[in-house]
Amino acid sequence: MYRHTLAGSVILYNPDYDVPDNVASYLNAVDRLYVVDNQNGKAVAERIAALAPEKVTVISNPENEGIAKPLNTVLRLCRDKYDLLITMDQDSRFLPGHMSSYRTGFDSLDWTSVFGVGPTVVPKTAQYNAVEGARVHKTREGHWNSTFHMITSGNVIDVSKALLLGGFDESLFIDEVDYDICYKADKAGFKLFTTPDILLAHQMGNPLAKRFLWRTIHSMNHPPVRKYYIARNRLLVWRKFHTMNEAFFFRHYIYDSALDIFKILYMESDKTRKIRASFRGFADAVSGRTGKRF
């Protein structure tokens, strides 16, 4: 019997056929799963609901509402019903046995000052999963490492604290939504942890790798629309939080933004559209244009 009740959320956006298989990797460990259909996800949502009709709630949006707004909808539904919420991306899955160990581990934590915890994210490849699938550990208190931010997928957050902080920033729409709420939590004095013992297979963009001088450069190779939101929201988030840690935010927000422009020019296709989208994002951040722009 667990001490903390746990809800889950997964947001569907033009989902692939294997998404129900991803959901099956954590469905048994949650008390309620909210499936948000953001666009073209009706058939997949129905297949997910069929896996466990008694615990799946489907929410159908009339249009793509991004990430932040659906997550806030789920947070409000969880108020006074569930202690914790695990937020999942549609293309993520826990390695076999890891979700049950994960829940046992974070359920045993003292959540008085903890805002959230996260797993270790690994590439979603068949080869990696075959090798690592058997590596299951029970998380213990000593296996939790302090962190500054975590991605949405696999992140378990305290519902009441998230609501206290005002929820997710809907002006961002997508991208940096997860980091933004982590920074708010850190600024409020709450703690965040990750564990190396729980592995989440996650697809990050359409990755590329190419040699440059003596090193290999990696790119997520996102499409132009994502380039816009990444560029814009990095500057918006940097503006909000850079005084917390000037060196960290310069490295991960200003330097990385410049590096992304280089990667587009050096190794990615569709360069013109991606560069235009990135610079439009920079311009909108400077002028304060937020929310859904495409």
Image (cartoon, rainbow, N blue to C red):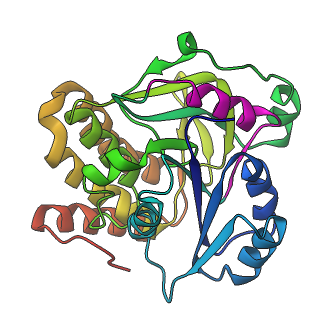
Q: Is residue 101 above or below residue 34?
A: above
Left or right for 218, reference 230: right
Q: Quadrant of residue 13?
A: bottom right
Left or right for 109, reference 37: left
Q: Nearer the viewer, residue 2 or 130?
A: 2
Q: Position of residue 243 (x, y in %)?
A: 11, 34
Q: Quadrant of residue 190?
A: top left
Is residue 41 found inside the magenta-colored segment of the image?
no
Is residue 94 found inside the magenta-colored segment of the image?
yes
Q: Nearer the viewer, residue 157 or 54?
A: 54
Q: Position of residue 269 (x, y in %)?
A: 55, 61
Q: What residue lies at 16% left-to-right and 37% top-to-bottom? A: 242
What is the span of residues highlighted in magenta in the rendered image?
91-110
Q: Position of residue 69 (x, y in %)?
A: 39, 69
Q: What residue lies at 68% left-to-right and 56% top-to-bottom? A: 91
- The quadrant the C terminus occupies is bottom left
Q: Position of residue 232 (x, y in %)?
A: 27, 60
Q: Is residue 257 above or below residue 230?
A: above
Q: What residue lies at 21% left-to-right and 54% top-to-bottom? A: 236
Tag count: 0
- The residue sitting at the bottom extreme is 62
Q: Is residue 230 above or below residue 260?
A: below
Residue 275 visible in the snapshot: no
Residue 252 visible in the snapshot: yes
Left or right for 273, reference 91: left
Q: Nearer the viewer, residue 257 or 165?
A: 165
- The quadrant the N terminus occupies is top right
Left or right for 66, reference 211: left
